[in-house]
Amino acid sequence: MNSATASQPYQSYRGLPPLAGLATHAEAARPGLSVEACVARLKRYHYAFVRLHEILTARITAEPIYELKTGFSHHSYLCAEHVAAIRDRVAEMREPPLGLEAVPHPALQVFFDEILAAPTAAELLVGVYEKALPALDRELQRHLIDTNPLADAPSVRLIRFARFELADMLAFGKQCIASLVDEPARRAMQPWLQLLDACLTESEAGAALASGSRRNLERQHSAKPYVYDPVPKRDERWQDSWNQGVNAESFIYNPEYPPQPKTLMMLYKRLREIDVPEMMASIIHETKGKPWNYYRDMSRQLWDEARHAMMGEVGFVALGIDWKQARITHNWSLRLNTECTPLERHAVLYFIEQGLMTRTGKRYEWELGVESGNPLMATIQDYDWADEVLHAQLGREWYIPQIGEWKKALDYGDKCWSKILSNWQEVRDRGLTQHENWWPAIYRQACRNWGIEPDPKVLAFSESYEGQRADLKTVASSA
Ligand SMILES: [Fe+2]
Ligand SMILES: [Fe+2]
């Protein structure tokens, strides 16, 4: 405290918090960062979040472990939101042209290219959650220390919010690494981790370093360009992935069956939606050059679909049902990812989601949830319905303009889906599945939990997808 204020210290009115609660006068009296320096830093955070979004999205489809698949779906979405927030902030700071597509430092590019190309889940996890995210968090923390809390309050706000979510992401990653990365695996990746550290040090040394002074940053995993794997993979809990032996829609829409067992088919349909993130990740990864809000909105939808799958999982677990006895096909995401273009996939997705907006779509599923007497089921379907209304809006915003007007876009979706004719017979002939009827095993488990005897008529349900058009045009399906 200097002598001028020591004699008569400055006081807020009746000791109220000064400066709208942002900081003390002493803190706000530090000059802090210039706008130019602040923007330069924001662009680094922006680049990091863009690359993390890219990396996590790219790994969703081919990552077999369900907890990682859904975790990456969540975190890629969070990154997309922080990218959007930073872009808005930079635009407020005398910055047109924004220059947000520029790489802040070549070493940073190598750093993220290496993580994108990590050949194993262990390396990916350590690269993202022990290297990239902690480095980003340290930089954000430094920003809060270095900047003027009053003058730069809008940046401080978005950084505090980002760090709040980064803390959750870091905690998730730490637990994943503890479960999946053992000492030998960690030892084997040491040379690579040293490269990552060297990249960070180099990039943090800043622009002052001439490119000639760069230390040895020889690419390892990214020496060959990364190739996206569009083939969905599942862990060992997901058996018989070609099985199309139980026609859930046929059961749900048959008025002769009561609501209670229909909730099991709805939970199955929710869990089966894990194929939507697997498919949407491929659209996002393979569609380049869109405005950022496209990626943000598509990532939001992808994350919603991962949540829908997890809501199905939660519903089964809450009923004490071993969902592994159901057969959850990967047919839809596999075929769309390997037989259709990204635009065709988007068209199919839109076509399906439009179908969910009818009287027999999501509203009907919610009504079933309410009638079933299972309050959790009502909650699941209530939010699932709300999410799907949002998805139909997002489709109107991003898909329809790529085709033209609404009717044309819808017809195109119908046509694209018709390209994928049912492979029920073919996969059976190839010995990939016997289309086993898993329904009685799931229904019996539920009856035990409900303390009732199985209804013989319900137990006997045995309709498969044989002979159905793959798009099941008359009923609601995936998504
Ligand atoms: Fe959806
Ligand atoms: Fe969904």
Image (cartoon, rainbow, N blue to C red):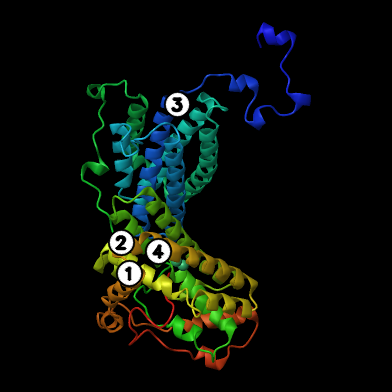
| N-term mark: 3 or 4 | 3
Does the closest atom of ligand 1 sit within 8 Å of the Cβ of label 1? no
Q: Are marks 1 and 3 in contact (CB under 8 Å)?
A: no
1 or 2: tag closer to the N-terminus: 2
Amino acid identity at mark 1: Ala
Q: Where is residue 390 in the image (x, y as percent from the top left)?
A: 48, 63
Under circle 2, the secondary element is helix
Q: In the image, residue 403 lies at what x, y percent?
A: 29, 65
Determine the CA span between mark 1 and mark 4.
9 Å
Amino acid type assigned to the residue bearing label 4 in the image:
Arg
SS assignment at label 3: helix
337 displayed left or right of 299? left
Which residue ends up furthest to the right in the rendered image? Answer: 14
Residue receiving disc 1: 409
Q: Picture quarter containing residue 99?
A: top left
> 10 Å neighbourhood of mark 2: few (<14), some, or many (≥20)?
few
- Residue identifier under label 4: 396
Q: Ligand 1: which quarter?
A: bottom left
Identify the residue position indicated by label 3 in the image: 35
Residue on which the image places disc 2: 402
User: Camera-side residue: 222 or 91?
Assistant: 91
